[in-house]
Image (cartoon, coloured by chain):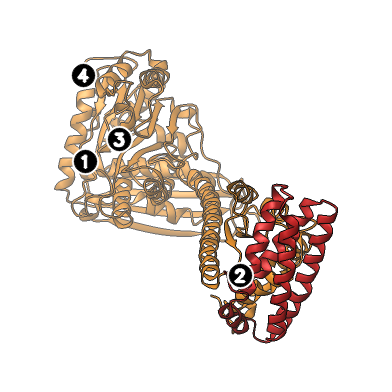
Chain colours: A orange, B red
């Protein structure tokens, strides 16, 4: 460090002494040791040169005319908050009280006269080491503080992105109540909700292992998959399967996500669910009936997401019937594992009885109050997230605003698409077909209706036409479960096909869409069925059956074609949104 | 009896000061004369403080030049000035004068 060869980088030492002989000797010794020397002949000269040349070390005679060494030292120390400039007092003072004055004034060391080269050199290099260390410390402190500020800014930006992606979108509706309480800046819990093109609602509650950033990071791909697939109308099993595949590929070993997915069909009043590792989802019925208890736990029957490879993953879902006014309640294990002051857990029993006993319209508020009351001021061990979904009439679900219609796309076209028996077993064609149809801009304003009609026609063709299931089974709660069991069994051995044919064009200002769905089944007595449906419709009776009433509502024409294994519908409307060009 | 001038110190200074060695000696001659002058004047006006500072300063120079005996005399004088003990001050002042003369003689011949 002390180099003769490069004086620009040499350490600068201020030598202040009014005694010319002493100053000359000292300067010579210091210069000889490789430092750059600045001479000062008294206190005022010392301060002037100190400010002008910013020395790294100061050697200061205690007794000088004008400003003495003590005054100079005090002024230097007061002005250098961050920079450490060691001061060595030059003194032949031997009285302890005088030495104490030096220390009090900010002196870091003493050097007694007459000067001794060896001692002086040792002191200089020792103080320089301290000074270097101090500077390193200072620099590191500044860097840490800079990095910390950067980190906080980054985290805030990331949290904004995270919240936009992982939360918010569809939670702000009257029939969903939710609570997300983050343990850290980020939250290991993720709550997602979205509508499909059919205006039915998907909810996914996930709890990633761990907390904070590591836990939150997996929520981004999960949300991405969830929102992308729900918007396109994929089914719950397909969505859960893809979420699992995605998390397997992005999460490090040992990280996973306990999750429950719900698909709530407000029109049919059914809830389809998949639960992997999350505490039971509770269905609290407004009205308990035989075989329909007031509280039905939908327990976990799968491993969490992100553990099993695609070939071992099970996307099997269960379906339960619900009624208007029923509530679905979900929570992450933060609720069950909440602790009171004695360290006892809140527990699933207490949660279950709260959900069962609270008045139906106060389930969410009661649980929340009870959990917080239980915890008092205890530290929260886990993220507490809970959500309640009320089963409301289908028409209260607001359709999502249609995206603006863009120019371009096909204007008049036809296509047909046939699924063989292997595809019928495990492939859902609706998202794909919807996507093809939506390539035509003039169809987009009716995307919900089109998807509903297509879904209705396909489920009729598959379940009644190809699989030969009897829809009347679905009219009792017991039959409902049996129906889904029979459907799953029949699908395993399915042998047949379903063919879609589409034709769309714009005639003057009217949009025309024709959909024909034909199946390999033997057909059915549609004449009698239609007769009965018209009577039911007039009397405003039940919903079950082949849903022709729904088709009548949404289509201009519905034609069954003998022997009943094909249905052709016509949809038509004014090309209201027109084109933007 | 301490020696008049420690020649080892002088040789070391010659080494350290290099070209500045003669100017150091000149400084000593000028400064020591001035300091002695100041000290005797302070004594005449009973200004113990200035007396003390003058001999303190002279003491430092002597130490650095290896004028060990003069340094000791100055130290003793400084002590008397500090505690305002005038009895032996004239005696010590004349010792300083004599010894300074000797030191000056030696230095001029270096």
Task: Give the secondary structure at mark 4.
Answer: loop
Residue occupying image coordinates x 36% and y 39%: A204
Q: Nearer the viewer, mark 4 or mark 1?
A: 1
Residue occupying image coordinates x 79% and y 55%: B50
Across and down, in percent, residue A373 comes to 39, 18
Mark 3 to mark 4 CA distance (whole Å): 18 Å
Task: Give the secondary structure at mark 2.
Answer: helix
Which residue bears the numbered disc 4? A291
Which residue bears the numbered disc 1? A302
Disc 1 and disc 2 on one polypeptide chain = no
Mark 3 to mark 2 CA distance (whole Å): 105 Å
Q: Is the residue B48 above or below the residue A17 in the image?
A: above
Disc 3 and disc 4 on one polypeptide chain = yes
Mark 2 to mark 4 CA distance (whole Å): 115 Å
Labelled pair 2, 4 in contact (Cβ < 8 Å): no
Q: Is residue A324 visible?
A: no
Q: Chain of mark 1?
A: A
Mark 2 neighbour density, 10 Å: few (under 14) some (14–19) many (20 or more): some
């Amino acid at each position: 460090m002390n180099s003769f060869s490069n004086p620009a980088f040499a350490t600068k030492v201020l030598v202040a002494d009014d005694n010319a002989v002493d100053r000359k000797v000292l300067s010579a010794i210091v210069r000889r040791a490789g430092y750059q020397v600045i001479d000062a002949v008294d206190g005022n000269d010392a301060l002037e040169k100190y400010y002008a040349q910013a020395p790294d070390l100061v050697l200061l005679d205690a007794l000088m005319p004008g400003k003495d060494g003590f005054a100079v030292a005090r002024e230097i120390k007061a002005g250098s908050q961050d920079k450490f400039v060691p001061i060595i007092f030059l003194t032949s003072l031997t009285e302890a009280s005088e030495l104490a004055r030096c220390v009090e004034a900010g002196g870091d060391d003493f050097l007694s006269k007459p000067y001794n080269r060896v001692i002086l050199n040792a002191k200089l290099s020792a103080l320089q080491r301290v000074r270097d260390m101090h500077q390193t410390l200072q620099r590191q402190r500044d860097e840490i503080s800079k990095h910390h500020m950067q980190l906080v800014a980054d985290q805030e930006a990331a949290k904004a992105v995270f919240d936009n992606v992982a939360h918010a979108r569809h939670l702000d509706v009257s029939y969903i109540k939710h609570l997300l309480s983050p343990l850290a800046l980020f939250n290991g819990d993720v709550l997602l909700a979205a509508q499909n093109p059919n205006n039915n609602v998907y909810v996914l509650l996930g709890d990633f292992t761990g907390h904070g950033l590591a836990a939150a990071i997996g929520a981004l791909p999960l949300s991405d998959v969830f929102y992308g697939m729900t918007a396109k109308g994929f089914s719950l099993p397909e969505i859960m399967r893809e979420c699992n595949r995605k998390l397997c590929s992005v999460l490090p070993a040992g990280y996973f996500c306990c999750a429950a997915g719900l698909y709530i069909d407000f029109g049919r009043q059914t809830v389809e669910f998949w639960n992997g590792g999350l505490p039971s989802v509770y269905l609290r019925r407004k009205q308990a009936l035989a075989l329909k208890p007031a509280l039905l736990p939908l327990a976990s029957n799968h491993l969490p997401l992100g553990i099993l490879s695609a070939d071992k993953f099970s996307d099997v879902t269960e379906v339960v019937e619900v009624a208007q006014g029923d509530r679905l309640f979900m929570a992450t294990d933060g609720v069950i594992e909440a602790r009171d002051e004695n360290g006892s857990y809140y527990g699933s029993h207490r949660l279950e009885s709260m959900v069962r006993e609270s008045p139906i319209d106060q389930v969410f508020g009661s649980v929340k109050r009870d959990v917080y009351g239980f915890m008092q001021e205890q530290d929260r061990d886990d993220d507490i997230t809970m959500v309640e979904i009320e089963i409301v009439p289908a028409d209260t679900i607001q359709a999502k605003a249609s995206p603006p219609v863009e120019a371009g796309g096909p204007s008049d076209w036809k296509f047909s698409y046939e699924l063989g028996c292997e595809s019928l077993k495990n492939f859902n064609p609706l998202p794909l077909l919807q996507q093809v149809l939506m390539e035509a801009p003039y169809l987009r304003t009716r995307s919900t209706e089109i998807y509903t009609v297509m879904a209705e026609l396909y489920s009729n063709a598959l379940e009644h036409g190809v699989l030969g299931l009897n829809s009347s089974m679905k009219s009792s709660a017991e039959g409902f479960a049996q129906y889904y069991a029979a459907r799953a069994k029949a699908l395993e051995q399915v042998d047949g096909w379903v063919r879609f044919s589409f034709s769309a064009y714009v005639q003057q200002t009217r949009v025309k869409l024709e959909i024909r769905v034909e199946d390999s089944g033997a057909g059915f007595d549609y004449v009698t069925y239609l007769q009965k449906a018209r009577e039911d419709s007039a009397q405003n009776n039940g919903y079950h059956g082949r849903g022709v009433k729904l088709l009548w509502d949404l289509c201009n024409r519905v034609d069954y074609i003998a022997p009943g294994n094909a249905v052709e519908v016509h949809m038509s409307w004014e090309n209201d949104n027109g084109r933007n060009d | 009896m301490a020696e008049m001038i420690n020649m080892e110190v002088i040789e070391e200074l010659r080494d350290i000061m290099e070209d500045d060695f003669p100017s150091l000696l000149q400084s000593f001659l000028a400064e020591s004369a001035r300091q002695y002058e100041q000290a005797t004047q302070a004594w005449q006006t009973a200004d113990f403080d200035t007396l003390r500072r003058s001999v303190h300063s002279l003491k430092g120079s002597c130490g650095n030049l290896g004028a060990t005996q003069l340094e000791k005399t100055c130290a003793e004088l400084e002590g008397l000035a500090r505690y305002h003990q005038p009895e032996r001050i004239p005696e010590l002042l004349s010792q300083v004068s004599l010894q300074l003369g000797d030191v000056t003689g030696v230095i001029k011949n270096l």
